[in-house]
């Protein structure tokens, strides 16, 4: 692991346009460890977002602050342009990065079970109650419920050890880190205009049975970018990189080739 400005990241050396991978809530860079086995020889930077993995909590964190932390990592590694793919919350961070740096520094943007829209008021209220629960009782119950709903029931019943491993790792993250990240998600603004204005290709990976991202939001974003690469995965929940590893590896490999055509 390497660090800069209290942000930890894993660097796989290689050639080509660097691939930057951002994890979701209650995950860390290791969610991509098996996934990147399909990218030998590619430079890949997998980052622990603030409050997760080995990265420190940001006091009053925001998605914008997380995006600037990513920017510092890429500056340190002298990455001028990258293909950035974010899972769930990581997609929200990637959109904030794209808002400020996308025109010059993104060769491609990937939303892996994510979307650009602001929370509804109902969802914001639920997140506020979740933060209060975590402040009072810690993260154990929240993380258990979170990962129980991440995959399809078929997958979780067939692979209980994988769900248990993800849950156990999620429980290790500090309550302040998880609560700060949820607050950052709760207060985010609509970024659909960012997708409209991007000139680089945009990848959408949607789980047909995703219980975390509302189907309406998953589908209505697909028409926003100028260049869209759209994949709706049947029998898949919110963890496509785990549930459909080989299929999504192929999708991302093809997306990299698409991005390289436009550089």
Image: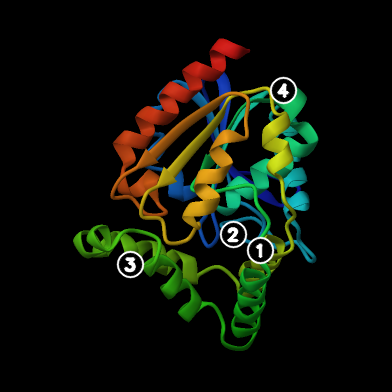
| Mark found first going from the N terminus, 2 or 3 | 2
Instruction: Name the residue that disc number 1 marks.
Output: 181
Instruction: Name the residue that disc number 4 marks.
Output: 80
**Disc 4 and disc 3: Cα gap in Å?**
38 Å
Q: Compare residues 55 and 253 and report the one nearer the observer.
A: 253
**Disc 2 and disc 4: Cα gap in Å?**
25 Å
Q: Secondary structure at mark 2?
A: loop
**Disc 4 and disc 1: Cα gap in Å?**
27 Å
Q: Position of residue 80 (x, y in %)?
A: 72, 22
Instruction: Name the residue that disc number 3 marks.
Output: 164
Q: Which of labels 3 and 1 is toward the front?
A: 1
Q: Check disc 1: other Cα within 10 Å, few if <14, some if 14-19, many if 20+.
A: many
Horizontal side, residue 28 vs residue 56: left or right = left
Q: Which of labels 1 and 2 is toward the front?
A: 1
Instruction: Name the residue that disc number 2 marks.
Output: 52
> In the image, is residue 45 above or below residue 163?
above
Residue at left offset 46%, top offset 80%: 141
């Amino acid at each position: 692991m390497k660090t800069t400005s209290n942000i930890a990241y894993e660097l796989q050396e290689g050639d080509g346009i660097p691939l930057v991978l951002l994890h979701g809530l209650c995950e860390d860079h290791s969610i991509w460890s098996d996934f990147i086995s399909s990218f030998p020889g590619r430079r890949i930077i997998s980052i622990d977002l603030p409050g997760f993995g080995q990265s420190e909590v940001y006091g009053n964190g925001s998605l914008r602050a997380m995006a600037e932390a990513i920017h510092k990592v890429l500056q340190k590694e002298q990455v001028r342009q990258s293909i950035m793919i974010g899972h769930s919350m990581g997609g929200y961070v990637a959109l904030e990065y794209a808002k400020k740096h996308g025109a010059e520094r993104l060769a491609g943007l990937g939303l892996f079970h994510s979307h650009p829209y602001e929370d509804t008021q109902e969802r914001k209220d639920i997140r506020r109650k979740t933060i209060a629960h975590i402040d009072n009782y810690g993260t154990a119950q929240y993380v258990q419920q979170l990962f129980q709903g991440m995959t399809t029931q078929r997958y979780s019943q067939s692979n209980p050890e994988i769900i248990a491993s993800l849950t156990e790792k999620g429980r290790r993250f500090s309550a302040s880190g998880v609560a700060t990240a949820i607050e950052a998600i709760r207060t985010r603004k609509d970024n659909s205009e960012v997708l409209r204005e991007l000139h680089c290709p945009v990848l959408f990976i949607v789980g047909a049975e995703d219980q975390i991202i509302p189907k309406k939001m998953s589908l209505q974003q697909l028409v926003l970018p100028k260049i869209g690469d759209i994949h709706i995965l049947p029998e898949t929940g919110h963890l496509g990189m785990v549930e459909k590893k080989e299929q999504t590896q192929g999708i991302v490999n093809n997306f990299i080739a698409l991005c390289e055509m436009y550089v």
